[in-house]
Amino acid sequence: SPDVEMSVMEIRWGIIPDMGFTRTLMGALRPDQLAELTWTGRRVDADEASRIGLVTRLTEDPVADALTLARTIASKSPDAIRAAKRLMREASQLDTAAAFVLETDLQVGLLGSANQIEAVMAGFAKRAPVFED
Protein backbone atom coordinates (compact mmCIF):
# COMPACT_ATOMS: atom_id res chain seq x y z
CA SER A 1 0.00 0.00 0.00
CA PRO A 2 1.36 3.49 -0.77
CA ASP A 3 0.94 4.51 2.87
CA VAL A 4 2.95 1.63 4.38
CA GLU A 5 5.96 2.20 6.62
CA MET A 6 8.51 -0.48 7.42
CA SER A 7 11.28 -0.75 9.96
CA VAL A 8 13.85 -3.15 11.33
CA MET A 9 12.92 -1.99 14.79
CA GLU A 10 14.61 -4.44 17.15
CA ILE A 11 17.46 -1.98 17.84
CA ARG A 12 14.91 0.27 19.54
CA TRP A 13 14.46 -2.44 22.17
CA GLY A 14 18.16 -3.25 22.54
CA ILE A 15 18.00 -6.52 20.66
CA ILE A 16 18.95 -7.84 17.23
CA PRO A 17 16.66 -8.90 14.39
CA ASP A 18 15.49 -12.51 14.59
CA MET A 19 12.58 -14.64 13.36
CA GLY A 20 14.23 -15.54 10.07
CA PHE A 21 16.14 -12.29 9.50
CA THR A 22 19.22 -14.16 8.29
CA ARG A 23 17.19 -15.83 5.52
CA THR A 24 14.89 -12.97 4.54
CA LEU A 25 16.22 -9.44 4.73
CA MET A 26 19.86 -10.48 4.42
CA GLY A 27 19.09 -11.76 0.95
CA ALA A 28 16.76 -8.92 -0.04
CA LEU A 29 18.83 -5.81 0.61
CA ARG A 30 22.32 -4.63 -0.13
CA PRO A 31 24.58 -5.03 2.93
CA ASP A 32 24.95 -1.25 3.42
CA GLN A 33 21.18 -0.70 3.30
CA LEU A 34 20.54 -3.55 5.68
CA ALA A 35 23.21 -2.35 8.11
CA GLU A 36 21.84 1.18 8.19
CA LEU A 37 18.25 0.05 8.76
CA THR A 38 19.30 -2.54 11.36
CA TRP A 39 21.54 -0.16 13.32
CA THR A 40 19.17 2.83 13.26
CA GLY A 41 15.64 1.39 13.30
CA ARG A 42 14.72 4.11 10.79
CA ARG A 43 11.26 3.90 9.22
CA VAL A 44 11.11 3.42 5.46
CA ASP A 45 8.13 4.76 3.51
CA ALA A 46 6.51 2.89 0.62
CA ASP A 47 8.46 4.64 -2.13
CA GLU A 48 11.82 3.93 -0.52
CA ALA A 49 10.78 0.37 0.33
CA SER A 50 9.99 -0.18 -3.34
CA ARG A 51 13.19 1.49 -4.52
CA ILE A 52 15.47 -0.62 -2.29
CA GLY A 53 13.67 -3.91 -2.88
CA LEU A 54 11.71 -4.42 0.34
CA VAL A 55 8.43 -4.67 -1.56
CA THR A 56 7.59 -6.19 -4.91
CA ARG A 57 5.24 -3.42 -6.01
CA LEU A 58 3.07 -0.61 -4.72
CA THR A 59 -0.67 -0.79 -5.28
CA GLU A 60 -3.76 1.03 -4.14
CA ASP A 61 -5.56 -2.26 -3.44
CA PRO A 62 -2.99 -4.78 -2.15
CA VAL A 63 -5.55 -7.47 -1.27
CA ALA A 64 -7.21 -7.45 -4.70
CA ASP A 65 -3.86 -7.43 -6.47
CA ALA A 66 -2.56 -10.26 -4.25
CA LEU A 67 -5.62 -12.33 -5.10
CA THR A 68 -5.14 -11.64 -8.81
CA LEU A 69 -1.50 -12.71 -8.51
CA ALA A 70 -2.51 -15.86 -6.62
CA ARG A 71 -5.03 -16.76 -9.33
CA THR A 72 -2.37 -16.24 -12.00
CA ILE A 73 0.09 -18.50 -10.19
CA ALA A 74 -2.64 -21.11 -9.57
CA SER A 75 -3.35 -21.19 -13.31
CA LYS A 76 0.18 -22.44 -14.06
CA SER A 77 1.45 -26.01 -14.01
CA PRO A 78 1.57 -27.12 -10.37
CA ASP A 79 4.58 -29.30 -11.19
CA ALA A 80 6.50 -26.34 -12.62
CA ILE A 81 5.53 -24.11 -9.68
CA ARG A 82 6.77 -26.72 -7.20
CA ALA A 83 10.01 -27.18 -9.14
CA ALA A 84 10.56 -23.41 -9.38
CA LYS A 85 9.99 -23.04 -5.65
CA ARG A 86 12.51 -25.77 -4.95
CA LEU A 87 15.02 -24.22 -7.35
CA MET A 88 14.66 -20.80 -5.75
CA ARG A 89 14.85 -22.24 -2.23
CA GLU A 90 17.88 -24.47 -2.79
CA ALA A 91 20.02 -22.97 -5.56
CA SER A 92 21.22 -19.98 -3.55
CA GLN A 93 22.80 -22.35 -1.03
CA LEU A 94 24.75 -24.26 -3.71
CA ASP A 95 27.90 -23.56 -5.65
CA THR A 96 27.48 -22.78 -9.34
CA ALA A 97 28.03 -26.33 -10.60
CA ALA A 98 25.61 -27.85 -8.10
CA ALA A 99 23.00 -25.18 -8.88
CA PHE A 100 23.27 -26.02 -12.59
CA VAL A 101 22.84 -29.72 -11.79
CA LEU A 102 19.75 -28.93 -9.73
CA GLU A 103 18.32 -26.82 -12.59
CA THR A 104 18.93 -29.64 -15.04
CA ASP A 105 17.47 -32.32 -12.79
CA LEU A 106 14.33 -30.30 -12.13
CA GLN A 107 13.92 -29.41 -15.81
CA VAL A 108 14.39 -33.00 -16.98
CA GLY A 109 11.71 -34.06 -14.51
CA LEU A 110 9.28 -31.60 -16.11
CA LEU A 111 10.05 -32.11 -19.80
CA GLY A 112 7.53 -34.40 -21.44
CA SER A 113 5.36 -34.68 -18.33
CA ALA A 114 1.59 -34.54 -18.74
CA ASN A 115 1.36 -31.04 -17.29
CA GLN A 116 4.23 -29.75 -19.40
CA ILE A 117 2.64 -31.12 -22.57
CA GLU A 118 -0.70 -29.62 -21.51
CA ALA A 119 0.95 -26.20 -21.06
CA VAL A 120 2.37 -26.37 -24.60
CA MET A 121 -0.85 -27.67 -26.16
CA ALA A 122 -2.95 -25.02 -24.42
CA GLY A 123 -0.54 -22.33 -25.54
CA PHE A 124 -0.74 -23.41 -29.17
CA ALA A 125 -4.54 -23.75 -28.99
CA LYS A 126 -4.84 -20.36 -27.24
CA ARG A 127 -6.94 -21.85 -24.43
CA ALA A 128 -6.60 -22.10 -20.69
CA PRO A 129 -4.65 -25.19 -19.64
CA VAL A 130 -6.24 -27.91 -17.52
CA PHE A 131 -3.56 -29.31 -15.25
CA GLU A 132 -3.55 -32.48 -13.16
CA ASP A 133 -2.47 -32.12 -9.58
Image: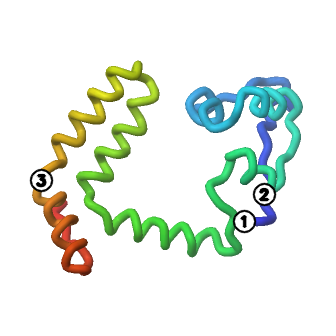
Judge depth for marks 2 and 3 and give the one in front: 3
The C terminus - image quarter: bottom left
Residue 73, quarter of picture = bottom left
Q: Is residue 31 above or below residue 132?
A: above
Q: Amino acid at mark 1?
A: Ser
Residue 121 drawn at (x, y percent): 16, 70
Q: Amino acid at mark 3?
A: Ser
- Residue occupying the point 28% across, 30% down: 102
User: Is 115 situated left or right of 72 in this image?
Assistant: left
- Residue occupying the point 72% across, 27% down: 31
Residue 18 drawn at (x, y percent): 66, 29
Residue under numbered circle 3: 113
Residue under numbered circle 2: 46
Residue 12, quarter of picture = top right
Residue under numbered circle 1: 1
> Mark 2 or mark 1: which comes first in sequence?
1
Q: Is residue 122 above or below residue 102?
A: below
The answer to whether the residue labelled 2 contacts the one labelled 1, judged by CB atoms less than 8 Å apart, is yes
Q: Secondary structure at mark 3?
A: loop
Q: Is residue 36 visible?
A: yes
- Residue occupying the point 46% across, 29% down: 92
The N terminus - image quarter: bottom right
